[in-house]
Amino acid sequence: MGRRNRTEIEYKNAIYHIIVKGVEGINIFTDNVDRNKFLQLLQKMVTSHKIQFLSYVLMNTHFHLLLKTEEANLSQAMQFLNSSYAHWFNFKHIRKGHLFQDRYKSHLILSPLYLYNVASYISLNPVEAGIVDSPEEYKWSSFKYYASLSSPSPSRLLNYSPPPWLKVEEFLKFCDTSADEFILFVKENMRNKDVEKSLNELFQAKNKFPKNIETILEKMNLHLEDIKTNKNLRNLLIYLLVKEGYRIKEVSNFLNLTKQAVLKICKKTEKDLNTDPIYAFWLETIKSRVLS
């Protein structure tokens, strides 16, 4: 069966959660030589495609990456990584054919809340699989580098300085958190038996914001203006909903838009907010009158 064409819209300075699985569930990492080779390719990917890595975990049958693309080149970067590793793996293990299932899954991350929760989910993969009791015990994950920055750090982690290509400090800054707070957050999630379900629930957390988009639209029409006649207000509302953690699919379905259209609106609105002060004013107005 032929591979499906990718249809995502790619952006500069975008953050993605990447998931890659072995074809038919095979092991894509069989020993530490494989894993070290893969990490070497990650480092090459940084320089060749201007990628910043925020988090990763290598499991036997799959891997997760949190990365930021400085250029709109995610597909090229992932093609380099997957094809380079597959070629090396097949040569080493004397095999032929595809190594990976499809190409990869990518989820665009537009809010610090979702980024924070995905990083926790990635860190807890080895715990969820029963490989280790605590995420810092797993060697093939970025979590140990975050744990080594916490206070106090386990003595065995004192020498775990993050490699230059892993942007730990950038992640903490973007999420407005500290290593201690992130470690505590992950450990609290570790007590939850269904980590993936917890991720979805936390992703939908919105403080005191209404959970029902229909309720939000009713308040928008009551206190401001009908978004059907004012596209600027509609775009600001869409941007705010996504930033506050509402699912892109949920927003697109309710407003009868495609997911690609929602992503375009978010990107355009972010530019408008940076260039026109009136957009920032109306954004705060929507927050105070509608999302409360």
Image (cartoon, grey):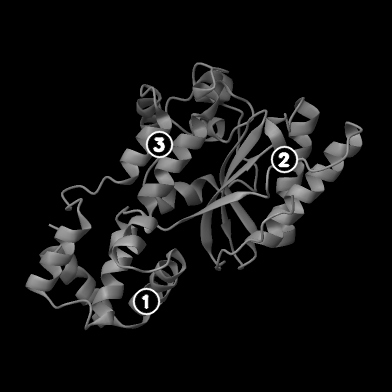
Query: In the displayed structure, does residue 190 sit left or right of residue 255?
Result: right
**111 vs 190: above or below:** below
Task: Label 2: state its secondary structure.
Answer: helix
Label 1 Cα neighbours within 10 Å, binned few <14 / some 14-19 / many ≥20 = few
Query: In the displayed structure, does residue 154 sit left or right of residue 40?
Result: left
Q: CA distance from mark 3 to mark 1?
A: 29 Å
Which residue position is annotated with label 1?
274
Which residue position is annotated with label 2?
39
Residue sticking out furthest to the left: 222
Task: Label 1: state its secondary structure.
Answer: helix
| Residue in the image at 36% along x and 82% along y | 275
Amino acid of disc 1: Asn
Amino acid of disc 2: Leu
Answer with mark 2 or mark 3, whichever residue precedes in sequence. Answer: 2
Amino acid of disc 3: Phe
Answer with mark 2 or mark 1, whichever residue precedes in sequence. Answer: 2
Which residue position is annotated with label 3?
182
> x%, y% of residue 8?
56, 63
Task: Label 3: state its secondary structure.
Answer: helix
| Residue in the image at 15% along x and 49% along y | 208
Q: CA distance from mark 2 to mark 3?
A: 23 Å
Answer with mark 3 or mark 1, whichever residue precedes in sequence. Answer: 3
Circles 2 and 3: CB atoms closer than 8 Å: no
Foreground disc of the pair 2, 3: 2
